[in-house]
């Protein structure tokens, strides 16, 4: 499978600081995969997201996007193929209404005006914001703003979506809604790739691949079941195993043999009720 992103020996130091924010990172993201990058504050997650998005210029290492090494010349063209959702949605709003804000990205991609209204309504509905299309963004709650920001990115149908703590302002139901929407879009478009920078271990459990950072270094990587099996290493960097895996581990200690394909509480409930 072709890689949509390759990072090789990437290091980064903010101007005026001695310690590296990122140190010798190397990993790849296959096209069509959902990769969760987890770690506490200061682990380098957001710095990595900014570099991939071209918001920070790196000097050590190599970043390849869509088969091209990222540089100043190709950055505008590469950005058109990706969508970014940041932790603070206020940084992304440009329109005077929810409708205008979702339309902004579509206009930049020269979507015909006669098709725009249907697209705006479709993606506002996906994030349960269709009743707010004529509201001003500043009058929305934090969670509602985040939903609008996500709708604006999804409406552009990018090849790569980068969520930088994008669901941090949502309640558990809202987080699940957005994840379900994203996974639904991936079913519609198997080539859609997602990189999610997150504190949410439960979200990471649903990913295809997990990368764990600590103090700018890559600590663990692999499938969720592989990464979260390293309970001692995770505890050392103050990360917990997902609730589901802790529950399954407790059940196994009690003699309950849980199949390896049980990857959600719903599936676990179905299995236990058989």
Image (cartoon, helix red, strand yellow):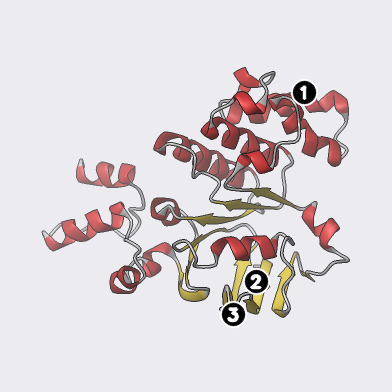
Figure quadrant of the C terminus: top left
Mark 1 neighbour density, 10 Å: few (under 14) some (14–19) many (20 or more): few
Dot in front, 2 or 1: 2
Instruction: Return the residue at label 1.
Output: 117
Which of the 4 image quadrants contains residue 129? top right
Q: CA distance from mark 3 to mark 1?
A: 50 Å
Q: Residue at x 65, y 47 (%)?
A: 189
Relative image position of residue 261 (x, y in whole percent): 35, 56
Which tag, 2 or 1, sits closer to the chain's start? Answer: 2
What secondary structure is found at the residue carrying circle 2? loop
Q: Is residue 46 left or right of residue 168?
A: right
Which of the 4 image quadrants contains residue 151? top right
Instruction: Return the residue at label 2.
Output: 14
Dot in front, 3 or 1: 3
Mark 2 neighbour density, 10 Å: few (under 14) some (14–19) many (20 or more): few
| Residue that sits furthest to the front in the current view | 16
Q: Is residue 261 left or right of residue 123?
A: left
Which label number is shown at residue 18?
3
Relative image position of residue 219 (x, y in whole percent): 45, 75
Q: CA distance from mark 2 to mark 1?
A: 43 Å
Q: Residue at x 54, y 34 (%)?
A: 142
212 shown above or below 256: below
| Residue that sits furthest to the left in the current view | 254
Front residue of 155 and 51: 51
Residues at circles 3 and 1 in contact by the CB criterion of under 8 Å: no
Q: CA distance from mark 3 to mark 2?
A: 8 Å
Relative image position of residue 169 (x, y in whole percent): 49, 40
Residues at circles 3 and 2 in contact by the CB criterion of under 8 Å: no
What secondary structure is found at the residue carrying circle 3? loop
């Amino acid at each position: 499978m072709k890689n949509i992103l390759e990072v090789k020996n990437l290091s980064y130091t903010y101007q005026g600081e001695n310690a590296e924010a990122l140190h010798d990172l190397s990993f790849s993201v296959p096209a069509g995969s959902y990769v969760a990058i987890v770690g506490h504050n200061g682990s380098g997650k957001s710095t990595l997201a900014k570099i991939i998005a071209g918001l920070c210029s790196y000097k050590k290492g190599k970043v390849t996007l869509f088969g091209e090494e990222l540089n100043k010349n190709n950055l505008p063209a590469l950005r058109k193929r990706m969508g970014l959702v940041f932790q603070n949605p206020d940084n992304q709003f440009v329109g005077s209404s929810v409708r205008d804000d979702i339309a902004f990205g579509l206009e930049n991609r020269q979507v015909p005006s006669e098709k725009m209204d249907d697209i705006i309504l479709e993606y506002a509905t996906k994030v349960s914001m269709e009743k707010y299309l004529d509201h001003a963004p500043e009058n929305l709650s934090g969670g509602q703003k985040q939903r609008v920001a996500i709708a604006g990115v999804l409406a552009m149908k990018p090849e790569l979506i980068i969520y930088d703590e994008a669901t941090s302002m949502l309640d558990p139901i809202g987080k699940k809604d957005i994840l379900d929407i994203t996974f639904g879009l991936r079913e519609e478009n198997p080539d859609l790739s997602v990189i999610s920078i997150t504190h949410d271990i439960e979200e990471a459990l649903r990913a295809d691949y997990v990368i764990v950072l600590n103090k700018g270094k890559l600590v663990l990587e692999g499938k969720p079941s592989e990464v979260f099996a390293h309970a001692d290493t995770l505890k050392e960097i103050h990360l917990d195993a997902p609730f589901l895996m802790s529950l399954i581990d407790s059940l196994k200690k009690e003699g309950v043999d849980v199949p390896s394909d049980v990857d959600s509480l719903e599936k676990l409930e179905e299995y236990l009720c058989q």
